[in-house]
Every structure is written in structure tokens, then in C-alpha cells.
Image (spheres, coloured by chain):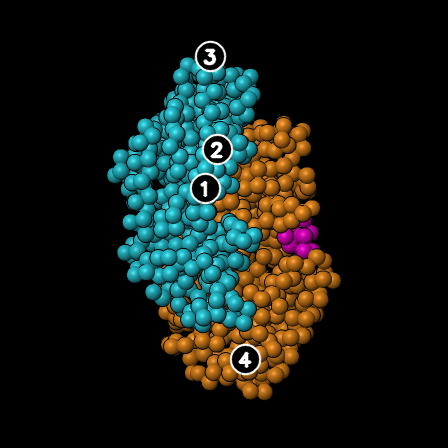
Chain colours: A cyan, B orange
């Protein structure tokens, strides 16, 4: 393959295998699967989920809700904190489909009224300290829950959490400790709140726990997103095997510097994003894999992307590898964080050569 | 202003002032100004340069060359290393306009022939060690220069450098030391090569040097890009004042956490990019500014964006500031690296409310 620019390749067989595995895990756990679509942001990939029996999804912005509503999805949770500036866009969605919003601040609905009922999830901070209500602050939670339950334009649906700190875990045992602590907090909180406002659902989403944990007792839905593609971070955490990673960047080599053990590819921060992971204490932005037919096979751990500028990627590699890759040859690199890489690229190309469009970049509405 | 999603604001008066100042600096230096258009990636902003008398530009990908060629630019240098996979796209451009390419590997033209003459610049590594030929490797450079000069489908134009290590400098004096060393190397190399291949131009581009240095003797063109918008890094380096930064992210507040001194905005890695800078030894992704009319004024150094996930931005701020910004209010944040933030956003909105489109995301050609 000789490329004129970097391309994000998608091995659809791997992605569909990841999808089937997660559907099976959700069935076994007895929970609804509400996959997060922020990773693929693609109508075509979304339809694979529909074919697998998925009918409810999560998204991370009003624009993404609108994009998937346009492809017929009619049960969408905006798993990102609602604020009054979103009101008109959420209201327009509520008029045509079942839309859920997430509250992370006691005043997020101040002055807001909806024309059609909106599901409301209370975001609970189970330990990642990104956002959400403190589960120990029962006073605030009871007040917010009662207020939502007492309105005619909202339905108090349940408690929603994302244990993002599982990304710092290494292996199933470490993920289990975080997962069990998060579930214990949510179950206790649900009991305490139910006395005042009736039954509440629990929605839990983080790819490490959804990919590895068996205990989902009392959980109504799981919301993993990244698993459709996986990536090097998920492999490092222990969510997947390296053979499950379904996307790879194909980057043209543009220059070789054997004396310093590096080659340069077209593939920079605007392609990979700047998310990195530590390997042996050093930041890495991607790891090479061996080409295999139209796709790729085993990782090449001594060929890593370790420095990025806007369009350049600097790859550390053994001298023989560098000499074997003149300008115009192609390097295949697994991304550190597939959500951000896919978002940066804006499209994926299947191994059959079909380009799958993603949600367009840029402003989505007059805002 | 109440926003439904993050918006990248552009203060056109500041940008045009930056443009006028750089045009004046180039005139004073007696060099051609060949601005790099990777920062704004916008037809409309590009036309301001044309109105200011600019006729030659630099871009960082074949797609960007095609995008600006479509708006009538007819003297374009691809200031990114050429490789054989680009041949067809460059050839199509060469048939209709003056296109220059950059070589950073002795084999980059292997097997390549163009149908119309292409300008060739030899990329020289003046110390940033990203890519380019070693200026001390005269043997290789003489061989490559002679080969290019001896072809009928290429014109050996000159030596091109980007002293990217000025970004690590602090203040005009430190920038000067890097700049003078880079120019000394280029001048010496030009003399040595000219004996064999005739006169060569020098093209130098880095916003810190172009914004602050007075010595351009012997330099034929300067290629700064970032200066049109500037950003926090350029301010830290000393290229600009904070009042010269012409873009700011406007982000809706979505949740407050006064107990931990933080608030959460809609504005994450897919909006800001993940480029960070160190302030007091800690990574910062943005700094707040006070709103001022339709735009913004002075920086608020104790309100900083210090943690990002895909859509969330976590801002550290004093408690009074947090309490005064309920969900739905707007925070204005200067970006760390405006090139990457603009690229991530895909559009800018002027203070008059006009949205300026940018180069579309996604694959630009069948590749």
C-alpha cells in the first residue's frame, strides 16, 4: 500500500467480534447494553450495533445526539452534564424520541422547562473525581432527586456513574476492586434515595469493568464505548488482548534518521491526538504492528511513536527496520486512545477499502 | 452569551493587527513573507493575507495545498517532507500552479517523475532534530543537491529550516541565540553548496524568531504560521503579549465543585487538543480571561484548565469565581497551542457572530 496521507484503518471483523463479545457479556450479566457511541461516531458502525439487537445508546454532546437521531436512534442518553444552554436542542430531541440527560450540579435545571418529558439521570462521582454528586452528600442528592421527581417535564430515571479511575488499574483484579467499590456505593445510595422518590435504575459505564467483571447484580445498564475498537491503553489496563484492537493508523514514512535510531512518518498530533501512555517510564503515542495481508498482525514493541508535532510523528526503531522503510513505505501503528484518534481523523477505512464517514467536525448548530 | 456547545472565538481585529505587524517585520527585514497556513486553515483568513499583499504560502499536507489552491493561491510550498506516495497529488498541483516540495531523505524522489517542474527545497536540521539533513553532512547534501539540480522535472530552489527549538526558549535573548546559530549554519552551508549547484535561497520559519529577531541578512523568506492567532505558549516564549492572542475558547460551565476548588466546562481533548504547557511545574491546557464586550480582556491567572477528558475540561479556580459561574454560564479560555485547537474545532466564530469554515476533516482524496 502506498498512501498519499495517513489513514485510520478499521478491521471490521475484529470490531464485530468485540461487539458480539460485549453483547454476550451484557446478556450474561442480565443488564441492558447502552453502548457509548463517542468512540466510532459513525452511522455505519452504529448500524452494526442495531443489527446485534442494541436499541439504546449513549452520546457525549447534543451534536452527537442529533447525528445519531438522524439515523433513526430513538432512545439516547446524553451521558455528559446538562446545562441550561443545551435546553433548546434537548427539547427538540425530546419532541421526537426518548432522550435522557445527566445532572451533575444542583442548579443545572434552573430556569429550564421542557415541552416534552425528558429522562433525568443523576451523575454520581464514584471515585474518579471528574464530576458528579458526592454519594455521601445525601442531603443534596435527596433535594435534587425530589425536585426532579416533582416536575412534570422530567422523569427521574436513576443514578449514572463512570468509574474512569479503572483506567489507572492494571489487570482484572485491580479493576475488580474499583468496580466493587463503585457498585457498593451506588447500591447503598439507591436504597437511601428510593425511600423518598421510588425505584431508581443504575447505569454504569467504563470499558475496563464492562470487559472484565462478572458482578453486575442490581445494575440496570452498562455503557461501555471504547470496546468497539479498543486501543493500547485498554490493552495495558487488561480490558483486551492486543489482537482485539480493531483500528490502526497507516502512516507514510517520510524520512529516515538511522544514526539517531528514528524515522519520521506523516502522522502527528492532528492525526493521533496527543494522548500518550507510559511504557518503561517514557511517553508513547503509538506502537507499530506487522503488516498482514490487507490488515495487521503482531505488535513490534521496539518500534514506537515517541514524539509528535502537528503533522510529524517521530518513531524510534532498530536500525535494520529503519533502513527497510524508505520514504513512501507504510508503517502501521496502534493508537494509544482510539476515541481521540478516530475523532481527530474524522473517518475510518475498512480493510476492503471502504471509507466510513463520521460525524462532521465544526459547529453543529447556530448554538 | 449562553452556548449549547464550545465555540472557538476569533478577535479579527487582533488577528489583522498580528498580520500587519508581521508584514511590516518582513518588509523591514527585506525578506519575502511566505506565511504558513496550517494554523488558520481557512479560506476567509487566507484572503486577509492576500489583501495585505501576500502571494506565496506554505502548507503542511497535500490536502491543505489543494484546499488553498481551490481558493486561487498559486505559489505554494509544502513545508513537510515529500515521499513518493504524494507524487500524483503534487503532480496535479504542479500542472496548474507553482508548487514547492521539501526533501528530508536522500531517497525521497526515488522512482518519481513529475509532468511539470516542481520547486525543491532541501530541509536542513538546524538543531530541533525533528527531521532534515544534517548540515555537517556535506557529502550527502552535495549528492542530493546535484541530483535535484540535474533533473529536468525539478528546480533546486534552496534550503529550508524550522528552528522549532525556539519553543523551548524564554525571551528574545534566548530566541536570538538559537536563531543566530541556525542562520550561521544555513549561510555556511549555502556557500559550500553553491559552488556545485549555483545560488540557493534560504527559507526560515518559526514564529518566535520571526516575531522578535532583527537579523535576517541573507534570508530570502520567512515562514511563520502561528503568529496570526498566537497562544499561551507563544506568550510564554516571548513572541507576543497576552493581548495579541486572537483566539479564545468559549466553554459552557456544566458543574461546580467548590469543595475541591474546581468547576467543569464542556471543552475537552476533542476541543482544545491535549497539548499542555508547564506553569509552576504543573501541566495547563488553557487559562481563563475576563469577558469584555463581545470579546475578552485580561487573563485570570488563577483560573486554569488543568485536566481534560474527551469532552470534559476541569478548571481550577477560586471559590468565589466558582460560585459566580453556574451551569450555562460561559468561561473564556486562551488555548495553549492555537494551531491544534483550531484544527480540533474545525471552525472559528468572529466576535460579530460570523462562523468561518476551515478545511474539512477526514480523508481528502482516494489516496
Residue to which mark 4 is pinned: B141
**Front in this rendered view, residue B254 or A49:** A49
Mark 2 to mark 4 CA distance (whole Å): 59 Å
Toward the bottom, the furthest residue is: B195
Is A266 placed left or right of B291 in the picture?
left
Residue to which mark 1 is pinned: A171
Kindly report which numbered mark, 3 or 4, lies closer to the viewer in this rendering.
Answer: 3
Using the image, name the chain to which the residue with label 1 belongs: A
Residue to which mark 2 is pinned: A177
Mark 4 to mark 1 CA distance (whole Å): 51 Å
Q: Are marks 3 and 4 in contact (CB under 8 Å)?
A: no
**Mark nearer the N terminus (3 vs 2):** 2
Residue B319 position (above or below residue B165) = above
Q: Mark 4: few, some, or many residues within 10 Å (few <14, many ≥20)?
A: many
Are the residues flagged by discs 4 and 1 from a single subunit?
no
Residue B217 position (above or below residue A286) = below
Residue to which mark 3 is pinned: A196
**Mark nearer the N terminus (2 vs 1):** 1
Toward the right, the furthest residue is: B173
> Judging from the image, what secondary structure is the residue with disc 1 in?
loop
Kindly report which numbered mark, 3 or 2, lies closer to the viewer in this rendering.
Answer: 2
Amino acid at each position: 500500500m502506498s498512501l498519499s496521507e495517513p489513514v485510520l484503518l478499521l478491521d471490521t471483523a475484529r470490531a464485530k467480534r468485540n461487539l458480539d463479545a460485549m453483547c454476550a457479556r451484557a446478556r450474561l450479566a442480565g443488564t441492558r447494553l447502552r453502548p457509548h457511541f463517542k468512540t466510532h461516531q459513525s452511522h455505519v458502525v452504529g448500524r452494526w450495533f442495531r443489527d446485534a439487537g442494541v436499541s439504546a445508546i449513549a452520546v457525549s454532546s447534543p451534536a452527537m445526539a442529533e447525528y445519531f437521531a438522524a439515523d433513526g436512534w430513538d432512545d439516547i442518553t446524553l451521558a455528559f452534564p446538562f446545562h441550561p444552554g443545551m435546553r433548546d436542542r434537548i427539547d427538540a430531541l425530546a419532541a421526537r424520541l426518548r432522550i435522557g440527560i445527566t445532572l451533575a450540579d444542583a442548579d443545572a435545571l434552573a430556569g429550564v422547562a421542557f415541552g416534552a418529558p425528558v429522562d433525568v439521570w443523576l451523575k454520581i462521582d464514584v471515585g474518579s473525581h471528574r464530576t458528579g454528586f458526592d454519594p455521601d452528600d445525601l442531603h443534596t442528592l435527596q433535594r435534587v432527586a425530589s425536585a426532579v421527581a416533582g416536575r412534570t417535564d422530567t422523569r427521574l430515571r436513576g443514578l449514572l456513574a463512570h468509574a474512569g479511575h479503572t483506567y489507572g488499574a492494571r489487570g482484572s483484579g485491580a479493576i475488580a476492586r474499583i468496580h466493587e467499590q463503585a457498585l457498593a456505593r451506588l447500591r447503598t445510595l439507591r436504597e437511601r434515595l428510593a425511600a423518598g422518590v421510588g425505584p431508581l435504575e443504575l447505569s454504569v459505564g467504563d470499558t475496563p469493568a464492562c470487559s472484565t467483571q462478572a458482578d453486575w447484580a442490581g445494575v440496570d445498564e452498562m455503557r461501555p464505548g471504547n470496546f468497539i475498537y479498543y486501543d493500547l491503553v485498554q490493552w495495558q489496563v487488561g480490558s483486551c488482548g492486543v489482537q482485539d484492537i480493531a483500528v490502526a493508523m497507516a502512516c507514510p514514512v517520510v524520512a529516515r534518521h538511522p544514526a539517531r535510531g528514528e524515522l519520521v512518518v506523516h502522522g502527528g498530533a492532528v492525526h493521533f491526538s496527543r494522548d500518550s501512555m507510559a511504557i518503561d517510564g517514557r511517553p508513547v503515542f503509538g506502537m507499530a504492528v506487522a503488516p498482514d495481508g490487507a490488515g495487521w498482525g503482531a505488535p513490534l514493541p521496539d518500534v514506537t511513536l515517541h514524539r509528535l508535532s502537528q503533522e510529524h510523528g517521530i518513531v524510534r526503531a532498530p536500525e535494520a527496520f529503519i533502513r527497510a522503510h524508505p520514504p513512501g513505505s507504510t508503517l502501521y501503528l496502534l493508537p494509544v486512545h482510539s476515541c481521540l484518534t478516530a475523532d481527530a481523523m474524522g473517518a475510518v477505512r475498512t480493510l476492503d477499502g471502504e471509507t466510513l464517514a463520521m460525524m462532521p467536525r465544526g459547529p453543529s448548530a447556530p448554538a
